[in-house]
Each structure stands twice: as C-alpha cells, then as structure tokens.
Amino acid sequence: MGLGTPKRDLRLAFDTGSDLTWTQCEPCTISCYNQVDPIFDPSKSTSYSKTACTSPVCSQLTSATDGNIEVSGENDWSIIDVGQHVIPKSGNQPRCSSTLDCVYIIRYGDGSFSVGDFSKDRLTITTEDVLDSFLFGCGQDNEGLFKGAAGLLGLGRNQISIVKQAAQKYGQFFSYCLPSTSSSTGHLTFGNGGVSSSVKFTALQTLSQRQSFYGLDLIGLSVGGHQLSIPTSTFSTGTIIDSGTVITRLPPTAYSALRKAFREAMRGYPMTSSSSSLLDTCYDLSKNRTVKVPLVSFLFGGGLRVDLEPVGVLYVLRLSEVCLAFAGNSDASSIGVIGNTQQRTLEVVYDVAGGRIGFGPGGCR
C-alpha cells in the first residue's frame, strides 16, 4: 500500500480479524521493531493530519479495538504469529494526548501491542484507486512479536476498516488466496471483478457482541469423505474465519472427533511427540517418500462443503514433526476460529454487502 503524499510504499499484514490499519511511524517516540521497508515519516507527507479527541471518529476506536478474539488454551508462539488477536481488556479505549490528539491503543493476544496517533492520510491502493483522508494508526510504540511487515491492514467489518472506508469504491467486496508456501504468489483483490463458477457461498453470520468478525455457520466436519458424528449444537457458540490466526480452533467435542478419525486414517505413519504445546497429533515423516493425507472437509450451512488441500491439513514444523493443524478450545463456550493454514490455496471471497462468504478450490498455489 502507498501511504502519504508523496506516497511511501509499505508492506502490511492483512487481517480479517482486525479493523484498525496501523503502521510504524517516525520518530518512533518509544519503540519500533525492525521492518523491511523504511519507517513512515508523517512529517514528510503533505496530506497527513492527526484526529482530535473531540472528533466523532475517535469514539469509533472503542468498537474497533475492543472485543476482538481471545483464543482459549495454551499458546505456542513458535508457530502462532502476530494477529492472534486483541484480548478484551481495559486499556483498549482511545486516549487523549497532551495536545488533545486522539491516541489509539491496540493489544494482541500474544502480548504484542501498538500505541500511537489516530491519523488521516492519503492511501494509494493502485494508481487509479486512491482514498483521501484514510483513517489509520500512526504507531509510536510497537512492541512484541511483530516482524518484517510495516504494520497491519484491517479487513474487519467495523466502520474504520479499509473494507468500510473504501465501500463506495469496492462495494464491500474483496477476495484473497493464501499460497501454499512463502515462495509462492497469492493475492488480495478489492472489488468484484467477476467470481469463478467454482466459488460456492455460504451465509455470513454476525456473532452477538462480536459484530466486527466474519462469522460462518459451521455445522460439521468430515474425514476421508465421511461426516463425523458431531451434534450440530456443538458449534452453536459460533465460528469465525480469520486470516490472522494460524491454527484452526474447534470446540473440544468437535476436535476430539476430528483427532480420533484423523489418527485412525494416519495409523500407518509413526506418531511423534510435539515440541508445540498447541498441537497434539504429530508424525515423523522423514523416512517417507510419499504420504497419503486423508481428506478433511468443513461442512457449512446451505449445503456448502469445503475440501482442504493437504497443505491446509498439516502444519510442517520439520519433516520429523508434521502435525494436524487443528487444536481444541479449552471449553465449549469459546468461539471457533478457522485459521489461515486451512485457507491455503483456496479462493476466499467476502461479499459483505451481499451477506455471504465463498470458497473455491485452486485459487493459487
């Protein structure tokens, strides 16, 4: 994304589970982490301005930075990267600086956080698509497990997300494909340029008290083409899809059923202990030239079945430690999360205005 006038190109991590877009800013009053691109300097942008505490948009920060995902269970940050999301705490309310500028505070579940000026500037998406007065966070204290990217691009459903701020231009429609490896190419596309016939849709759900998230009506799972015996009520707490969470979290009952069926299907391969406290079904595949991975599928309301590629089923820590890329929530009251491992190679389409989310195979490799 290009930010400022003249624009400075910044690589941002896009996140469907967050609303606030932010980037590290000079003079990095307290702390900035190492990033690939030069840090944005707002003093060199002729279109930059801060927002005032008295501005109505400052109050929007409360809903945009509060109430995000709290993932239950033990976290293993060797694999769970930044984007494992905001824990509801006091302290995520907007504040006022000594000069009465609006200050944002956003804290993530791994302990990482960003604090800075809630600001406006020109955002250049393409040479033809430019958003003036785009609301974003200009971070002056950014600490934790962030690395490489200049900040975060918020794709949630709150009014300050880029989806809402660019609604007139793109009609609240976007899609992406996360590639199978970091050396492969995926995409993030804004607007409806035509949806492949292979993309099938299910209704977008809105979770109570979690209206910023993209809820899905997950009703079941299948392994090897056979639907597991999981009561539909198991998923009644709700499920969201999130590009910023790595490992999918399921209700305990659903995960137990999946684990049992998966282990049975993989009984010909040697299991091994896991170095991750999060993953509990791992295999030593270092001596296998080929591996047959059982088909795992999500079953959604409306009759949609989404088959996962093997790269969306297994998380490879090393060849001697290849794990089922799912985990169980610690209790049945926690929401489920479909993470980015399961989304790999799929075309994932968000038609927010149309109230639907679609999936198609082979979106990228």
Image (spheres, rainbow, N blue to C red):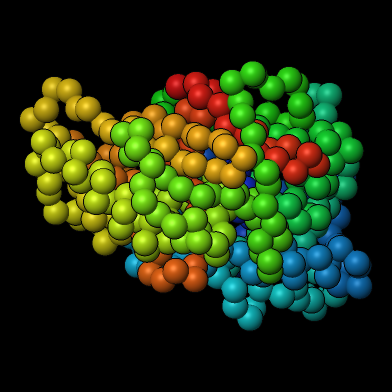
Q: Quadrant of residue 327?
A: bottom left
Please provide percent x and percent y for residue 80.
40, 54
Q: Which image quadrant: the C terminus?
A: top left
Q: Would you place residue 223 above or below residue 113 in this image? A: above
Left or right: residue 165 versus residue 237 is: right
Q: Would you place residue 47 above or below residue 195 in this image? A: below
Q: Would you place residue 187 above or below residue 271 in this image? A: above
Q: Residue furthest bottom?
A: 90
For image coordinates 64% across by 34% down, the residue present is 201
For image coordinates 27% across by 51% down, the residue present is 259
Q: Quadrant of residue 104?
A: bottom right
For image coordinates 26% across by 46% down, the residue present is 261
Residue 193 in view: yes
Q: Would you place residue 129 above or below residue 53 in this image? A: above
Q: Which image quadrant: the N terminus?
A: top right
**122 and 349: which one is in front?**
349
Report the number of discs: 0
Left or right: residue 289 versus residue 25 is: left
Please provide percent x and percent y for residue 276.
25, 57
Please provide percent x and percent y for residue 315.
31, 42
Residue 242 in view: no
**148 and 325: which one is in front?**
325
**2 and 314: which one is in front?**
314
**232 and 334: which one is in front?**
232
Left or right: residue 70 versus residue 52 is: left
For image coordinates 49% across by 56% down, the residue present is 232
